[in-house]
Amino acid sequence: MTDTHCPYCALQCAMTLTPTAGEALPVTVAGRDFPTNRGGLCKKGWTSAELLADTGRLTTPLVRGADGELHPAEWDSTLDLIAAQLERIAAEDSHDAIGVFGGGGLTNEKAYQLGKFARIALRTSRIDYNGRFCMSSAAAAANRAFGIDRGLPFPLTDLDTAETVLLLGSNVGDTMPPFVSHLQGARARGGLIVVDPRRSSTARLCADGAGIHLQPVPGTDLALLLALTHVVIAEELYDSGYVRQRTSGIDALRQSVSVWWPERAETVTGVPARSIRVLARRLAEPGSTYILTGRGVEQHVDGTDTATAAINLALLLGLPGTPGCGYGTLTGQGNGQGGREHGQKADQLPGYQSIMDPAARASVAAVWGVDPDDLPGAGVPAVELLQTAGLPGGVRALLVHGSNVFVSAPDVSTVREALGRLDLLVVADFFLSETAKAADIVLPVLQWAEEEGTMTNLEGRVLRRRRAVDAPAGARSELWIMAELARRLDAPGVWSLDPSEVFDELARASAGGRADYSGLSHALLDLGIEAHWPFPIGSLGTPRLFADRFAHADGRAKLVAVRARAQQTPSADRLTLITGRLLEQYQSGTQTRRVSELTEKRPSLVAQLHPATARRHGIGEGDGIRLSNSRGTVQARAELTHDIRPDTVFLPFHYPDGESANLLTDDRVDPHSAMPEFKRALVQLSAV
Ligand SMILES: Nc1nc2c(c(=O)[nH]1)N[C@H]1C(S)=C(S)[C@@H](COP(=O)(O)OP(=O)(O)OC[C@H]3O[C@@H](n4cnc5c(=O)[nH]c(N)nc54)[C@H](O)[C@@H]3O)O[C@H]1N2
Ligand SMILES: Nc1nc2c(c(=O)[nH]1)N[C@H]1C(S)=C(S)[C@@H](COP(=O)(O)OP(=O)(O)OC[C@H]3O[C@@H](n4cnc5c(=O)[nH]c(N)nc54)[C@H](O)[C@@H]3O)O[C@H]1N2
Ligand code: SF4
Ligand SMILES: [Mo]
């Protein structure tokens, strides 16, 4: 029996894997008692043993031959080939002609090693990762306001006794089902408030007096938050002592929201002015109140400002750092938190340190055994990295570890085209993802239950992921692949194959950073301690941040005045497309589309449409529909439901090829975070 955590999302539910006696699946999965999931798992967790079955598993490197097909190859010759190509491209062009694209599903050890590999083995600045598509706006907002970014700055169980929880653009009912148990306290007090243009499964939890569901026009959350802040200030509902002692910037904030009276916000958001006032007063009632954001409000071109507006509201109400209260964002990928701390991001070194900070460069370079002047500077964010591939100034080779950008990147047809221009696309995966299918070289790697490592969950809690089964012969660990390539490239530094040694090095490299892991080790984690970072040497960890001070030099949080911008509105012939997730599928679907029980439930793309909208277009339940705009066309089946606004259509983004919702999304990005506009696009609807 092996105690570990789920292969999927950031809740990282605890589970126990028990070997079977030669049955079809090598292990059985049982939920394990843990503060976050209390023994519960969602369908994806329950069925995760299917990922370990043989079907579709990659077990040998694949190299594209002269016939255009991928063929099995030996490891040695494949790695020689990659190293030779990389050397050629760097010599012909520059080190920056080689790019790396990482993932928030990698363990801390692999994410750390990948960042180091890019900087000192490939000597490129061009590394970024899919966390840019996920947490970047929330992170940018938190860094700006608090000086630090830890998704939840408190343990999840703190929510249990909350009286009021405001959930903005988060659908935990589908995306983290065991999370819902932490909302029961708020529901019992009528205090669950969900803001979502759809009546999502989470919004349904507000029924029967458990709370309120507000259904704004998509993309107008910023105006809604400015109006809530307006009411809090105009009616003097804010915590003036807290604002005076713990924040700066109130004057500019006050001025910026003065024009957002609720009646004006109603015309933009469609949320009645009366509801805005009622909500502002409810949030300001004394008691246990939390404000939480999800991707629905963050994955927009104004996502950083929207998250900032949510933080401003929380600060005015005195929530962050106050016992029984708080603000947080719900990290998405399994290691979405740790993945963004240890150097996969274009501008970051391990420990959430800036690659532009001379002191951080010096201390990390010392751990890596290189000269700080040899470290590259900041690279470019994900969308730019992908879109400029194969163009002058862009990368000519790309190594992908842990992302399926052929499905999940915005305006995906241009990304597919861009990656087609590369001299060399190498994809490391355990399944032949859509991106792997297009690669020149595919490297079969280890997954979840086949390797040791650590993950950092949505609470900033570092967890041990453990090996429960043998990997198929032929698959290799990514630590080994990096070590082998580093050797072939004559790279400096130590390239350990042992995850616990890599963790020790990560811990040293993170020392003094915002995400300091220097007091942690696998051995300590194996004792079962609660390990929330920062965890410097000699500390007992930090379950709760902000009790006395924020992370800015003056100890105060910054209120940052933000403005809502006008945007294109839907019309009689154009609907607003919003995108998101289904309970039964995970991300680009590489993993969950292989699990029969999940795929039987959700085999293909279904669009949610309001019956009135469907009728206008002559569309009935289950009919084929076409959604299109200047970027592309998608075919789906119609599901008619009153859960969605008549001006809006919802698509999940889990499906490949012509069913990819990202054929319709836009590659415009947020100016602060470089997060693309995933959650809102205008589309034309027609019957097929
Ligand atoms: N089943 C499942 N669970 C997952 C994942 C998965 O793929 N499948 N992925 C994991 C990851 S990486 C992440 S990041 C999380 C994401 O978790 P969530 O943030 O909960 O997921 P989404 O479905 O992307 O978006 C949440 C809601 O935002 C709403 N929304 C869309 N546009 C807007 C808007 O303009 N304003 C507002 N207020 N709401 C809007 C959608 O209707 C949707 O219900 O889930 C994690 N858990
Ligand atoms: N329209 C739209 N698009 C979106 C979103 C949205 O809401 N709407 N959400 C965005 C968000 S929040 C996210 S997080 C992204 C996610 O999108 P992707 O980055 O595509 O995420 P996954 O599908 O999880 O892809 C991970 C891939 O890596 C593999 N993998 C998993 N673990 C490992 C590992 O340890 N090593 C290696 N080498 N491979 C591994 C998996 O098999 C899979 O093929 O999508 C974004 N795209
Ligand atoms: S909620 Fe997330 S971590 Fe928990 S079982 Fe489901 S996918 Fe796994
Ligand atoms: Mo995500």
Image (cartoon, grey):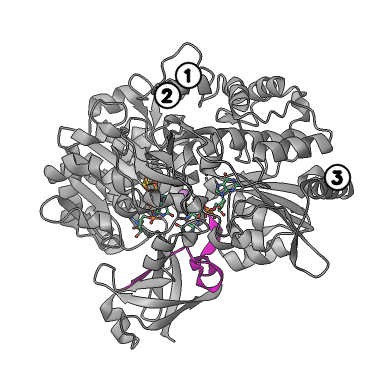
Q: Amino acid at mark 1?
A: Leu
Proximity of marks 2 and 3: CB atoms separated by less than 8 Å: no
Query: Disc 3 marks which residue?
Result: 87
Give the Cα distance between marks 2 and 3. Answer: 41 Å
Residue 263 in the image: state x and y as whole percent.
Answer: 22, 58
Sequence-wise, which precedes: disc 2 or disc 1?
1
Query: Disc 2 marks which residue?
Result: 531
Foreground label between 2 and 1: 1
Identified at 66% across, 46% down, the residue is 473
Q: Is residue 368 left or right of 603 when viewed as pictured?
A: right
Residue 632 lies, with reference to residue 388, above or below; the image says below
Identified at 32% across, 42% down, the residue is 292
Q: Is residue 376 visible?
A: no
Q: In the structure shown, which secondary structural element does the residue marked by tag 1 occupy?
A: helix
Res 642 quadrant in image: bottom left
Q: Amino acid at mark 3?
A: Glu
Sequence-wise, which precedes: disc 2 or disc 3?
3
Proximity of marks 2 and 1: CB atoms separated by less than 8 Å: yes
Mark 2 beta carbon near ligand 3 (under 8 Å): no
Identified at 29% across, 73% down, the residue is 646
What is the quadrant of the C terminus in the image? bottom left
Q: Circle 2: is it few (<14), some (14-19), or many (20+) Cα within 10 Å?
A: many
Q: In the structure shown, which secondary structural element does the residue marked by tag 2 occupy?
A: loop
Residue range in magenta is 647-670
Q: Nearer the viewer, residue 90 or 251?
A: 90
Residue 140 in the image: state x and y as whole percent.
Answer: 48, 40
